[in-house]
Amino acid sequence: MRAFGPRPRPNFDELYRAASDPLIWEQHPEPDRYKAAVFRKYFDALGGAHALRFVDRVVFVVGENNVRSQKALEKIGARFVGLSERPGNVVFEIVRT
């Protein structure tokens, strides 16, 4: 028998370590998200709520030339899916296991 319960909260320190490189956010609309206080706000709103508690899959669409964001997604466990329907973008996903 499998027991179900709340999924563990993602570890802020691990995610922030991956997200703390200013170059990752250089092309992002919020380029200061590498700062701990700014990232904490983002983490608490999204990561802290942990979308995978409510859905089975989270999809990320990033620019095909935005290697920094792609590497950051890989660091938090996302996998490359393929080209997006939006020209110039690729798709990554994290799937609940």
Image (spheres, rainbow, N blue to C red):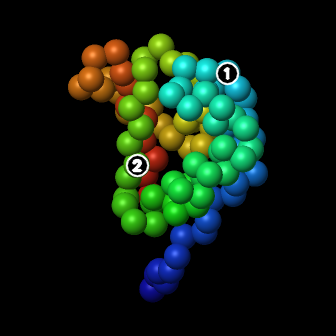
Residue at 44% over, 32% down: 80
In the image, 46 versus 83, the foreground residue is 46
State the quadrant of the N terminus. bottom left
Can residue 15 be seen by looking at this rendering?
Answer: no
Hey, what amino acid is under mark 2? Answer: Val
Question: Exactly how many numbered labels are in the figure?
Answer: 2
Query: In the rendered structure, which disc, 2 or 1, sits on the residue that comes first in sequence?
Result: 1
Q: Is residue 76 above or below residue 50?
A: above
Can residue 57 be seen by looking at this rendering?
Answer: yes
Q: Residues within 10 Å of mark 2 (few under 14, many from 20)?
A: few
Residue 75 left/right relative to 95: right
Q: Which mark is residue 85?
A: none
Q: Quadrant of residue 74?
A: top right
Q: What secondary structure is found at the residue carrying circle 2? A: strand
Residue 7 left/right relative to 1: right
Hey, what amino acid is under mark 1? Answer: Leu
Task: List x then y, in percent, for residue 10.
Answer: 63, 59
Q: Quadrant of residue 48?
A: bottom right
Return the residue at label 1. Answer: 23
Gap between marks 2 and 1 measured at Cα: 23 Å
Q: Mark 2 against mark 1, which lies toward the viewer? A: 1
Residue at 66% over, 44% down: 38
Task: List x then y, in percent, for residue 33.
Answer: 64, 36
Return the residue at label 2. Answer: 58
Q: What secondary structure is found at the residue carrying circle 1? A: helix
> Residue farthest to the left?
85
